Image (cartoon, helix red, strand yellow):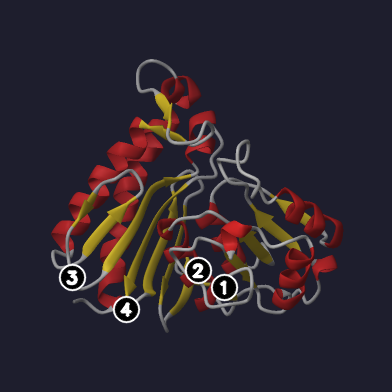
């Protein structure tokens, strides 16, 4: 198995190739994505879209990762994959599909390699923004080769945070609405951009001071949480426990506001989905 240092440039090249597929589709505009030519369909939830470009990018990612890392497993959002035993690559070919489909450039390809339950390589590539975030365990976090550091905000009233809402919010009682209102009342600002991998990258870059969300998947968290940690931040579950990629509930921050953010979330009620 390649070391993180050896695997990273290969993963970056593969992510950028998938980004080119997305950039070509994005250049056609919403009519091309949502119209009859390519189509966009809902998955399990009404607001959870998948487009032809998700599928094209995923096919490229799975094929090239399997070729480059034949002994590694690949697990991708739209169902593609490859069997392996050495490590697991979690792949989101298009994180922010709804943004992409409507012409909003906040979307990304996310790749994260997990070894013994811990991410050790992460790439979040945003082709429309020309930003490539990378991290290796113990090797730091970078954007376009510039090293990243989390912010120094030390209280919520000085902080700007990101969050998101689950796609099943119309039918499930666990919606993040109460928690959003509670944090919004305490923080300087809260933003919702619709790409959890990029939101975590923004924490690593010091743009966001924190981020929280629930009902995510391992491909939403593997690369992003590594970016946060390697930039000097903290990524845990909502109760402050070690982050579980499979449980899907994350609180990521610069570390300085982490305890305060956890307390505000707990005060608004801990949803069953994050326990």
* Few, some or many residues within 10 Å of mark 3 (<14, 14–19, 20+): few
- Tell which circle, 2 or 1, labels the residue nearer the N-terminal end: 2
Q: Which residue is identified by label 3?
A: 85
- Tell which circle, 1 or 4, labels the residue nearer the N-terminal end: 4
Q: Are marks 1 and 3 in contact (CB under 8 Å)?
A: no
Residue at position x 25%, y 71% in the image: 87
* Distance Cα–Cα, label 2 vs label 1: 6 Å
Circle 2 SS class: helix
- Tell which circle, 4 or 2, labels the residue nearer the N-terminal end: 4
Which image quadrant is residue 213 in? bottom right
* Few, some or many residues within 10 Å of mark 4 (<14, 14–19, 20+): few
The residue sitting at the top extreme is 36
Q: Is 78 rendered above or below residue 180?
A: above
In-image side of 81 versus 270 (left or right):
left
- Tell which circle, 1 or 3, labels the residue nearer the N-terminal end: 3
Q: Which residue is identified by label 4?
A: 116
Q: Which residue is identified by label 1?
A: 235
- Which mark's residue is nearer the viewer, 2 or 3? 3
Q: Which residue is identified by label 2?
A: 225
Give the image location of residue 76, x and y in percent.
31, 51
Q: Can I make out residue 43 in this image?
A: yes
* Distance Cα–Cα, label 1 vs label 3: 26 Å
Residue at position x 42%, y 60% in the image: 218
The one of 58 and 30 positioned closer to us in this rendering:
58
- Which mark's residue is nearer the viewer, 1 or 3? 3
* Distance Cα–Cα, label 1 vs label 4: 18 Å
């Amino acid at each position: 198995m390649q070391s993180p240092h050896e695997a990273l440039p290969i993963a970056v090249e593969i992510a950028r190739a998938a980004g080119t597929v997305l950039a070509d589709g994005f250049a056609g505009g919403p009519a091309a994505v949502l119209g009859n030519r390519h189509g966009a369909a809902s998955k399990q939830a009404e607001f959870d879209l998948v487009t032809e470009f998700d599928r094209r990018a995923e096919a490229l990612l799975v094929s090239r990762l399997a070729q480059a890392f034949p002994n590694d497993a690949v697990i991708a959002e739209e169902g593609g994959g490859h069997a392996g035993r050495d490590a697991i690559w979690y792949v989101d070919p298009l994180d922010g599909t709804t943004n992409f489909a409507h012409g909003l450039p906040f979307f990304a390809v996310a790749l994260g390699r997990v070894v013994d339950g811990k991410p050790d390589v992460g790439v979040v590539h945003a082709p429309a923004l020309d930003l490539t975030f990378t991290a290796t365990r113990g090797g730091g976090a970078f954007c376009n080769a510039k090293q990243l550091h989390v912010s120094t905000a030390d209280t919520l009233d000085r902080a700007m945070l990101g969050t998101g809402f689950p796609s099943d919010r119309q039918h499930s009682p666990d919606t993040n609405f109460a928690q959003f209102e509670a944090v919004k009342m305490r923080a300087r600002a809260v933003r919702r951009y619709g790409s959890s991998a990029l939101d975590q990258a923004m924490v690593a870059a010091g743009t966001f001071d924190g981020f929280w969300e629930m009902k995510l998947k391992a491909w939403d968290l593997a690369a992003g949480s590594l970016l946060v940690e390697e930039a000097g931040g903290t990524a845990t579950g909502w109760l402050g426990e070690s982050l579980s990629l499979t449980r899907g509930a994350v609180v990521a921050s610069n570390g300085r506001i982490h305890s305060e953010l956890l307390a505000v979330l707990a005060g608004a009620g801990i949803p069953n989905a994050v326990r």
